[in-house]
Amino acid sequence: MEKLNKFLILAVCVLLSGAVTAQSTWADEYVPAKSGLDVVFVMDYSGSMKSNDPDRMAKGMVKAFVDTVHSADIRIGFVAYNDQLLSAMQPVPVETSEARQELKALIDKAGYSGNTDIGLGLKYAFDLVSREKGRKKAVILISDGESDLAGSVTGRTLENSLEDMEYAALECGKAGIPVYSIAFGDYDGNTGVLEELSDRTGGQMYPVEDAETLIGVLYGIFEGNTDFSIEKITDGIYAAGEQNIRIRLDEPYVDELDVLLVSPQTVGAVRVFYGEQQVEAFGLNNYAVAKIEQTDSQVKELAVETETVKNQELQVYLIAYRNLTPVLSVEPAAGKNRPLACQVYFKDAGGNVIADEGFYTNFSWQFTLSGNGKTEPVQAVIRDGIIQGESIPGHAGTYYLEGSLDDHMGKAVFPPVEILVTNRRPEGELPAAAGYTVLSGEQRIRLGEYFSDPDGDEIRYALGSAGEPFVNTEIRDGELVLRPEKAGTGTIRLLVSDGEDTYEYPYTVEVVPLWKAYWPAAAAAAAVLLVLVWKLLHRPATELEELEAETKNNHFAGKLDAYFTVQPEGDREIPPLSFQMHRVKENRISLGSLLEAYPEACGALDLDRIFLVADEDRRMILYHTADASVMVGSSILCRQIRYSVSFGDVVYIASEDGAYDLEIHYIAVIQ
């Protein structure tokens, strides 16, 4: 029976759930709007119901539904018929106990008697249904048999009843009003007639043999208009006496609890203890209802006390209602290739966000982002106490975010939310063009060094128009290639694209005439040359030149004997050398000139910068700027200092790296 209940509830709620529309409470918050529901019960009060429902359980379950239904914008109407109309009421709100009492009194007004005219009751029910737009409507037909007017004194025939059934089926189908037909009890007739009626209107037919199944079907119709759960707590046969039934409360964030007791026998007095509250149940005969409208999340259990008679059958149901508003929060605009975040959460009646990780773990969800011809799932997880998802749209355009969130108490369907995804075009700037000439040759500008895309897209380049006649232009391997052809100035149209947007970047290039480009350089070069010549002609004499001038009338005397005391291993040994200085005509000579036959040694000892100048009285002046170590006897000779060398003096020269050592002896000769 439990399995049948779930099937009936699911079947009816799917057909009644309909579509929801988005209603923005803030710029970035969207809630699914629940449509109001108008239900008209059409009940068979014919004489055959006396045997099929001797305990008036069908009436009782409809009244129990009226007593326990949440006032979530639901209106209930009623039509009682046999072979004529017995009583009727158009759909009215059932928010107050007075409204519920009036409707229940109407249900109890007539007894079971007479023949059956289903067409009459259906046609009248259709006429009672509001034509108000934006509300869901349904007709619930409860009957234990087909139309039967044999012996009826109303003057109506079976053909009249069938015509009215056809009219109701046709009009309900056109208006989108499903007819749910319930073949109650030991149905007398062909249930195929009811099946066809329900199929044509988008409803369904249910065989219901007892009150337990009927209450399940009725709550299935209500599902989709609010979040609720209905749980059977007990179903047993009790002995006479006082019964104490305890019910554990596991549902968080409920705003109403209803305890429903159903029995074929009369239900005794019922008291429900909930926290500090003691609630007296109300009801008639076969059912009792205790409503707890002031709930407390700290209360985790309630107790039901009731009196039973011997062998009394009793079912106890707990119906919980949750009045939270599901919210989908998302920015209506986003950037391409950047995270698009969305959040899903509930708000309570005070507008406070429910941030409770344990609560959201009870839900399943599914969200998708559609756009650019694709629909992709949005991954979402519970974080910071709510459900958070993220997706990265890879193209600009209009996207639609939609999804659903559900648990065992209800389902929220979020309609498509439009999101505008924008693309940012590439940005950058080329450096000012240099003064090209026809002699400049091919010029390349690597465009990737100057342009970038803020969205991370690959940038492509093209030329927007033919190259200017003064410069040949092309794009090659991401470079702007310029080949100046002749003098002139113009603008190159560079097209910069990120694959979605393209814009034209103007780049001005000037090819300068040769005379204009080079006369400043020629003038500058001439000026530099003049300055150099002047400096050469007017430069001050060096100290060596001054020394040479001072001693121009002197002549060398004697000779120099040279000995390489150290030289690199493996080199050809340099023999002792002798130079007749008295035969040198100039009054200045470098040691490098004397030993030019040995260039490696000259270079290592820096001999080209060690000079000998003829002095008076057969002496020589040694002057050097070399990096080598120079000594006369035991005296070290500093650079750019004049030193006198006499007969018998020995000059020692050592290279910086120690590879060469040279001794020079100044010796007198007989002339």
Image (cartoon, helix red, strand yellow):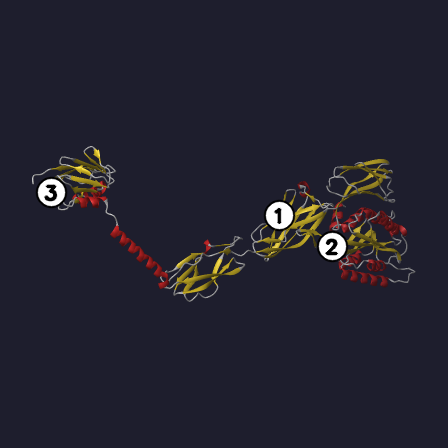
Q: Earlier in the sequence, mark 2 or mark 1?
A: 2
Estimate the x, y position of residue 252 in percent, counting from the top left: 72, 41
Residue toward you, 281 or 510: 510
Q: Earlier in the sequence, mark 2 or mark 3?
A: 2
Q: Amino acid at mark 2?
A: Leu
Q: Are marks 1 and 3 in contact (CB under 8 Å)?
A: no
Q: Secondary structure at mark 2?
A: helix
Using the rendered image of the protein, determine whether residue 535 is visible from the camera's viewpoint. Answer: yes
Of all residues, the one furthest to the left in this rendering is 671
Of all residues, the one furthest to the right in this rendering is 153
Q: Answer left or right for 67 relative to 607.
A: right
Real-space CA distance between mark 2 and mark 1, rounded to the nearest whole angstrom: 30 Å
Q: Amino acid at mark 1?
A: Gly
Image quadrant occupied by the C terminus: top left
Residue 15 — which label?
Answer: 2
Residue toward you, 130 or 332: 332
Q: Which residue is mark 3?
A: 582
Residue 389 — which label?
Answer: 1
Residue 609 picture quarter:
top left
Q: Secondary structure at mark 3?
A: helix
Estimate the x, y position of residue 445 in percent, counting from the top left: 43, 57
- Residue at point 78% right, 62% down? 170
Compared with residue 330, is residue 150 higher up or lower down, i.e. above or below? Answer: below
Q: Secondary structure at mark 1?
A: strand
Q: Are marks 2 and 3 in contact (CB under 8 Å)?
A: no
Q: Amino acid at mark 3?
A: His
Q: Nearer the viewer, mark 2 or mark 1?
A: 1
Label 3: how many Cα within 10 Å (few below 14, some 14–19, many 20+): some
